[in-house]
Amino acid sequence: MKDSPFTYGTTVSINSFTNREKEAEKLRSNLLYGINTTIISPRRWGKSSLVEKVVFDIKKKEKNVKTIIIDLFSVSSEEEFLELYAREVIKASSTKWQEWMGTGKEFFKKLIPKFSMGFDEADFSLSFDVKELKKHSHEVLDLPEVIAKKKGIKFIICLDEFQNLSNFEGYAEFEKKMRASWQRQRNVTYCLYGSKRHMMSHIFNSPSKPFYRFGDIMLLPKIETAKWIKFICKSFETSGKQIPEAIAAKIPELMKNHSWYVQQLAHYTWNMTTKKASEVEVNAALKELIQANSPLYQKEVESISGTQLNLLKAVAKEETKFTSTAVMQNYNLGTPRNVSKNKDILINYDLIHEQNGAYEFLDPAFELWFKKQYFNQPYIK
Ligand SMILES: Nc1ncnc2c1ncn2[C@@H]1O[C@H](COP(=O)(O)OP(=O)(O)OP(=O)(O)O)[C@@H](O)[C@H]1O
Ligand SMILES: [Mg+2]
């Protein structure tokens, strides 16, 4: 049996990557022309995949440009970040491992890097004396520019889950240092993105913060319906199955074009299909998808307060005037102050967002689950 042509749960920079030509071109030219770029979107719309794809293309074509992607998800302190950053910069600066140690030593003035080789010759880790590192962190932050100038190369540095840095002790100071160093660099371009949309917006959109106007802010849109339909039909075909266009169209429609869920629903549908998919398979796949995710949704509602849950119910019922007496009483929303505070909390949790003056759920499958759970509405109308 052939493997499923659909992927979710990991980035899809090569296989299963679709559309995004416009965004990819914009990001590519930004990064090549030295425009620092921040990418912001709700969760799982495809930020990491887009960056990987663009970086992959640049790597293939531009021999003089060294690219780095660092995921900061599990980094837990400023020192750990600096060591990782220095290591990746040194690693990317040369393909010859013999050069790494020399490079490392040559480019620091005060800091003394300690190298330790891994089992694999192509890998090493690097550490500094913690006190010294705190004092001279600018040497690490400046490192890519110094190497780039000396070697006549350019760097593109992509930092995924960037907002994670803001959890570190002493972040406010460190943020200023990063900005001061990075904005002066002429041969290094940064791409910063992360899954916590509100934290990212706060870092890059607040006039009083150091990273305000650091570069371009790309608000990544959803992938269009027509592109999804084409992608689904083609993927079925190349894997020896079929899906009529009108049936394929149901998948992005049900999942409101949400990248991760479209892939997941397409995968379940594909899995249930022997030869040719029909509405029956799509509907069964939807049930399976919601069932598979329901423990997560259950947790989600358990983590919010009673009045927040009530507000979510009002959103599910497409109410708009949350502070009108009727709505507040009907849904038991508390005081107008409660309503406004709870609304902010639900937005911050990325459970809802504002769209054309109305509020809606961000997660299309959670919405279907929620409406069935609390209002007994069937998944499919
Ligand atoms: N261009 C694309 N074409 C097809 N599927 C995509 C595309 N981009 C994203 N996806 C789907 O969406 C899923 C999530 O993508 P990705 O991890 O890149 O999103 P993200 O925005 O970085 O998520 P997070 O906010 O959680 O970091 C992928 O696993 C894949 O199923
Ligand atoms: Mg991501």
Image (spheres, rainbow, N blue to C red):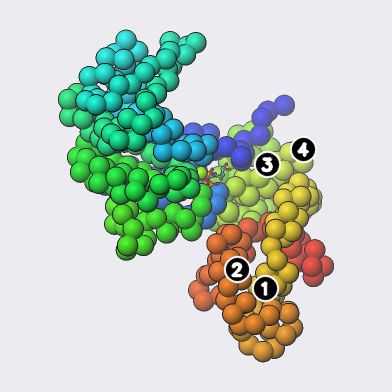
SS of the residue under disc 3:
helix
Q: Which residue is mark 2?
A: 360
Residue 83: numbered disc: none
Question: In which image quadrant can residue 9 be found?
Answer: top right
Q: Which mark is residue 274?
A: 4
Instruction: Please tell me whether mark 1 sits on a helix, a strand or a loop.
Output: helix
Image marks 4 and 2: residues in contact by CB distance under 8 Å:
no
Secondary structure found at label 4: loop
Of mark 4 and mark 1, the one earlier in the sequence is 4
Q: Nearer the viewer, mark 3 or mark 1?
A: 1
User: Image quadrant of residue 143?
Assistant: top left
Kindly check if marks 3 and 2 are in contact, taking CB atoms under 8 A apart as contact: no
Instruction: Give the secondary structure at mark 2.
Output: strand
Q: Quadrant of the N terminus?
A: top right
- Mark closer to the observer (3, 2): 2
Which residue type does callout 4 highlight?
Answer: Thr
Residue 267, label in figure: 3
Residue 290 visible? The answer is: no
